[in-house]
Image: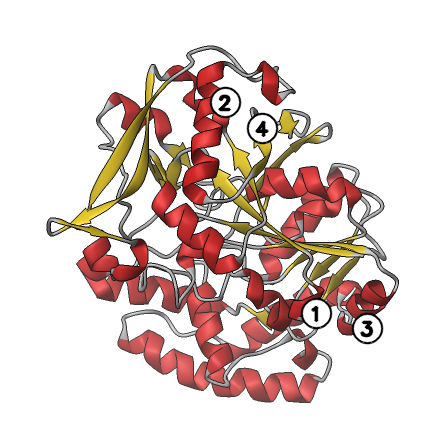
Amino acid sequence: MSVTVVIGTQWGDEGKGKAIDFLARDADFVARYNGGNNAGHTVVNPIGTFKIHLVPSGIFYPHTRCLMGSGMVMDPAVLIEELKTLREAGIRFEKRLFISPRAHVIMPYHKILDGLYEEAKGAGATGTTRRGIGPCFADKISYNGIRWSDFGDQTLFNQKLRVQLELKNKIIAALGGASLNFNKVCAQYQEYYGVLKPYIAEIFPIVQGGLRARKQFLLEQAMGSLLDPDWGTYPFVTASSPLASAVTGGLGIPPRQITQIVGVAKAYTTRVGGGPMPTELAGDSDAGRALQEVAATTGRIRRGGWFDAEVARFAAELNGADALFLTKLDVLSQFDQIQICTGYQWKGKRAHYYDLNAYQLGEVKPVYRTLRGWQTDITGIRKFSKLPEPARQYVETIEKLVGVPVRWISVGPEREATIVR
């Protein structure tokens, strides 16, 4: 039996979808334990290219059973569309996809409020995806949430929905939005429930049975560790904990059952939305443009910068990472020189990530180490020894600075474009 947790060591977008798709070939269970459709995992396999937002990325292996845990929040319209796309691609998931009835449901007022709150903040906006994730988690914590288990009792569901619409419509109206109609929302969401009901099942006995049978579990994090509401760059964070420790609340797996924690790190750093990013390069610079990306979920531009070993080391220590899965090394092949941030200077003194709040982190001066680039195509290489010497040195430098061995190296988006050490 093994329980492997895959976590991001940066601000999300590290390439966890690629890592999970690669590692899932040996898994009996693949499970999501946090977040919602504000996450976007890109999977490139022999079937095609997929942007996965809610369904576990191991869904492409017919032998896996995929679990969507109670730590998630779900937009039913997005989930239904995702399942439709998978079905049209020939993926069969009946009797192997299970949705926790304890998971909370994103309602239309959550998405409306997410947008209205951002607009009301003006220049102080957090930079959310406006998918309703934060307001849904806020309702969960404040005892105002609606879970999948509520849909099975029409009287209970109607009662809860009426109460929430009475509350939320007042807030929406006060912020200049249009009120929602009870009958319309009720009918639409009961229709969603009818489609998803075959997949809703209590996952606790499934998990415990798998653990007793010594099955292989692969647990999938959404977001990145630096977006944790406690340890991330608050308030520029996400609403649920993305840390490895969150698997207990999000899936019902005891901490002592975790056997391996894999940290996924992009070979450079990106961030989408607001918040500090010490190694960010100017968007109008050649390097800055070269490292920018388009976010899979929102289509927004990800800010690009050099690899920040300070935050990756912190995330690895916080989660207890045993190994690193380094992604997108091939992207750096275009540079003759590459820099790595080894730490920070703040007000003339050396400072660590954990010494600073989000606003102070935005004021730091990164300390860089410059390495030689390799400027040759590495996408066809499958052995570490075959990489150009500067590329090997870059990987080994990351290992030393982060303090965790790099076991896998992605040199392209495809499943097979992976070096195993």
Determine whether, in the image, residue 392 is placed left or right of residue 349.
Answer: right
Cα separation between marks 1 and 2: 43 Å
Q: Of the residues under marks 4 and 1, which one precedes in the sequence?
A: 1
Q: Residue at x 50, y 29 (%)?
A: 328
Q: Of the residues under marks 1 and 2, which one precedes in the sequence?
A: 1
In terms of depth relative to the viewer, which is nearer, 72 or 322? 322
Q: Secondary structure at mark 4?
A: loop
Crowding around mark 2 (Cα neighbors within 10 Å: few <14, some 14 to 19, many 20+) is some
Q: Which residue is mark 1?
A: 100
Badge 3 vs badge 4, beta-carbon distance below 8 Å? no
Where residue 350 sits: x, y (%)? Answer: 20, 50
Cα separation between marks 2 and 3: 45 Å
Image depth: mark 4 or mark 2 in front: 2
Q: Which residue is mark 3?
A: 205
Q: Which residue is mark 2?
A: 392
Q: Secondary structure at mark 3?
A: helix
Crowding around mark 3 (Cα neighbors within 10 Å: few <14, some 14 to 19, many 20+) is few
Q: Which residue is mark 4?
A: 413
Cα separation between marks 4 and 2: 19 Å
